[in-house]
Amino acid sequence: MKKIIVIGGGYAGLSFARRFSHFNCDAQVYLIDQNPYQYLQPEVYKFIANKCLISDIIIDLSTIAEGLGKKIYFYKDKIIQIDTDKNRVIGEKFELDYDYLVIAAGSRTFFPPIEGLREYASGVKTLDRSLDFKQKFERDILKKIKEEEKCYIQRENQFNIIVGGAGLAGVEIASEMAYYARDFFRRIGFLCNGLNITLIEAAERILPGMDQFVYQTAINRLKSLGVNIITGKKIVKVDKENVYLEDGSFVKQDFFIWTGGIVASSLIQKMGIKKNKRQQAVVDKFFRPEGMENVFIIGDCAETKNHKTGEILPPMAQVAIQTGEIVADHIKNLIENKPLKEKSPIFRGMVSALGGRYGVGMIRNGIKFKGYPAYLFKEAVFIHYKLPLRIISKKGYKRLLKEQ
């Protein structure tokens, strides 16, 4: 019986396990992650804005594995080394040999060498960080309210939130926080807002590289929510009170959020394979690094291309899910001694939350939409992904209860 090890229980790794569970192959899949849950990061903005509970943005991996059937197993461990010569992965708790290895270890926030950035920045890339972010933000807001004897009239006395990086993540979090803050102050009866949100982007415009419709919708929404936008200026230093820009100016900060891009998991950096500037693995048309016939790298930790067009696809959940499914097919063919069939993931479009029940989206066929319809579309996409997993998890949970 063949042994397949999958490192990472995120979108890519879990989609592989789901797909492979349907095959009648003489193989077992060992899904390994350092956390016992999948963290649904695209939905974290709702969690921060108190629209959902923490249980709504995580899914238990052990019950998922049980629900997928007896050929899928889950182990909680952190992989610290991969020995591709001996076909072995080494974790903090145990070592496992494999016939096929799928690395879906994801990515982490990129911190450039900016003085004070790591020390003073908050982020949402992990569940721990998003929880800390939410609690710190609310504590700081409460502290500011207690310190003030009257409504914030003077701008310098406002609570200043700075978001560094205006890609999709930065724009989403700035708009969601602006909407949440406005609603927060309205609900508790404050006559004025007292919150000042500034979005800073080094490029000449927010959402660099995105479609003009998405850009214009986002900037109009941000402005309507009162978000200040600074573009064309790099952040060069951060301290407890200010964020300093390359032109010598600075912006006061009480709370600083960094969303300036990603790099691949540190596990990829330890491997002696070709990587791009994001430290993502460079893989062939079958998602294998050069010279490794039984190792596949998928999701955010790999540079994913549409090999027919040469287009490098963005590190998004939809792309990660497709790579997991494609590689499941590849390994099935290898086990059955069939030739591999080239297949590339497709970027089907995007939809982004812009605060409250408002969003913007576009589908690959050219359809563009905004406002409430975009919000509904995003909700539908998320439900389409999460609901089947909840059903599988419940099935696994019932099985585990019977075994006790």
Image (spheres, grey):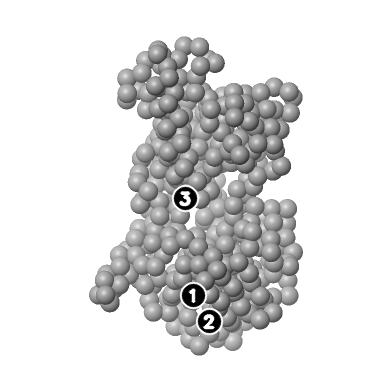
Question: In the image, what residue occupies the spot 30% across and 67% down?
Answer: 397
Q: Relative to 403, is 47 on the left or the right?
A: right
* Between discs 3 and 2, the one toward the N terminus: 2
* Residue 299 x %, y %: 58, 60
The answer to which of 40 and 343 lies nearer the viewer is: 40
**Which label lies toward us, 3 or 2?**
3
Secondary structure beneath label 2: strand
Residue at x-position 39% and y-position 47%? 379
> Residue at horizontal 40%, vertical 22%?
145
For image coordinates 47% across by 50% down, the residue present is 127
Disc 3 marks which residue? Answer: 127
- The quarter of the image holding the C terminus is bottom left
Sort mark 1 into few (<14), some (14-19) or many (20+) by Cα contacts within 10 Å.
many
Tell me the amino acid under the disc marked 1: Tyr
The residue indicated by pointer 2 is 3
In the picture of the structure, the residue carrying the numbered disc 1 is 30
Q: Amino acid at mark 3?
A: Leu
Q: Secondary structure at mark 3?
A: helix
Rendering coords of residue 182 (x, y %): 41, 25
Mark linked to residue 119: none
